[in-house]
Amino acid sequence: MQLETRPVRIGIIGLGPRGETLLANLLAMTGEVEIVAVCDLQEARINKILGILAKAERTQPKAFSNYQEMLALPELEGVLIPTSWNSHLQIARDAMAQGKYAGIEVGGATSLDELWQLVHAAEATGVSCMMLENCCYGRNELMALNLARKGLFGELVHCSCGYEHDLAYMACEIENGFERALHNLHRNCDLYPTHGLGPIAKILRINRGNRFISLTSTASKARGFAAAAEKNNWQGCAGHKVFNMGDVVTTVIRCAQGETITMTHCVSLPRPYSRCCRVQGTKGIWLEDAGGIFIDGISPTCQQIDVAGNPYTVHKWNKVEEFYQQYDHPLWQEFRRNPIGGHGGMDILTLRAFLAAIRDHAEPPIDVYDCAAWMSITCLSEQSIALGGMPLPCPDFTNGKWFNRTPAPPSIWCLDEVYEK
């Protein structure tokens, strides 16, 4: 899938590991993007990126250590911001103030105030910020969206999602100032909500006919990081035995249309990776961890007899792959012929969606209201846990526009409705 229009002129602010990953994806997008500027506080990182671009025989971008100077470039149309969780929202606000589209990396917010500032900046400037939540463009997530819009799940009732990933080794990066390690040491919340919540929010039409109403969060005891450090004799933990982050953080969200969402955050205990997605309706279900879909009237059922002679119905999963031929999202119907880019191709699709919004001067498919609503879960869950699991209201960042906001304009990149190309 190649875009046939002009390349978009962008810059990258933050040239750490994620910045390098984004650059690798951009280099694979021949003719779609031009990197005109890069910025980082560390000169060594700048030189490394310039070297990569030189080796790839690409035009050398302008280099900056001050992102404000970079944002003043008139030729710059948008910026990617893979900086720290505590800085990317401020940089996004400054970018929009200069009329540049902002593509921020994932992560939760520290306060509601910074999210309101983000919303106000987008509304005041007429440009927007897009969260680069690549999981929204995952093949199974987009197929679940397609199934939901075609009514195969029936009326949606309950969803679940989360981030369960054994990252206990990161506990030993405290002395190096590793960001996630510092948050795990000092905070207790759903630190990383958007990988699972983003696709679910789109399926439930959050901010376009629906919204988050309230949430309650609770956290288990914190034992996993310290246990992993002791087991592996990780000296880098420098004696840290008490981590504030509960091993399992559970959040339940109520939505305006009556659906519920259960979220799980667990990064300190041994287990395989999962975003534990579930979409449950009156006619069927998609369950990520089962690798299966069950649709009433389509999926297999059989009658059996229990030991007492009583009949009962056994419901069986279809494998997710069995639905690809008929229900693959239109975007993946084309992209699967030549999937390129990181995270199974999701990175490329997310970047293309961002570039398309800039090129067309359009609202991005993950807009500023989505960014604010999804990122707010982190600070709200932190407050709820601190208050003993007290329910808290979720802000309406649209200020009442959610109940009659129309779907985004027809586009293959749209995540609100499914448009056939």
Image (tube, helix red, strand yellow):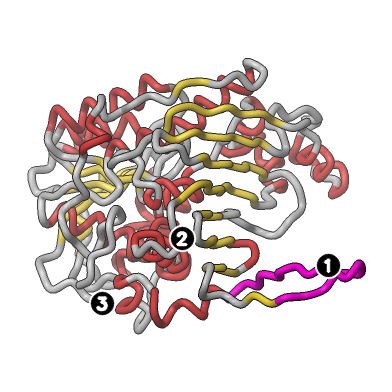
- Segment tinted magenta in the rendering: 303-319
Dot 3: element: loop
Question: What is the secondary structure assignment of the residue under circle 1?
Answer: loop
134 or 258: nearer the viewer: 258
* Vertical order, 80 against 412 (above or below): above
Q: How many residues crowd mark 2 within 10 Å: few (<14), some (14–19), many (20+)?
A: many
Q: Earlier in the sequence, mark 2 or mark 3?
A: 3
Tell which of 59 and 128 is nearer to you. Answer: 128
| Amino acid type, mark 3 | Met
Magenta stretch encompasses residue 364:
no
Mark 2 residue element: loop
- Label 1 sits on residue: 310
User: Which of the two discs, 2 and 1, sits closer to the camera?
Assistant: 1
Number of the label disc, if any, that sits on residue 1: 3
Q: Residue 140: image x %, image y %?
A: 47, 66
Residue 393 located left or right of residue 405: right
The amino acid beneath tag 1 is Asn
- Which picture quadrant has residue 354? bottom left
Quadrant in which residue 345 is drawn: bottom left
Circle 3 Cα neighbour tier, 10 Å, few/some/many (<14 / 14–19 / ≥20): some
Label pair 2/3, CB-CB below 8 angstroms: no
Q: Residue at x 43, y 52 (%)?
A: 155
Q: Measured from the top left, where is residue 80 in percent x and y?
A: 30, 48
Residue 339 lies in what quarter of the image? bottom left
Horizontal side, residue 107 vs residue 245: left or right: left
Q: Nearer the viewer, mark 1 or mark 3?
A: 1
Task: Say the numbered circle drawn on residue 153.
Answer: 2
Place of residue 124 in the rendered image (x, y in percent of width and height, measured from the top left):
14, 27
Q: Residue furthest right?
A: 307
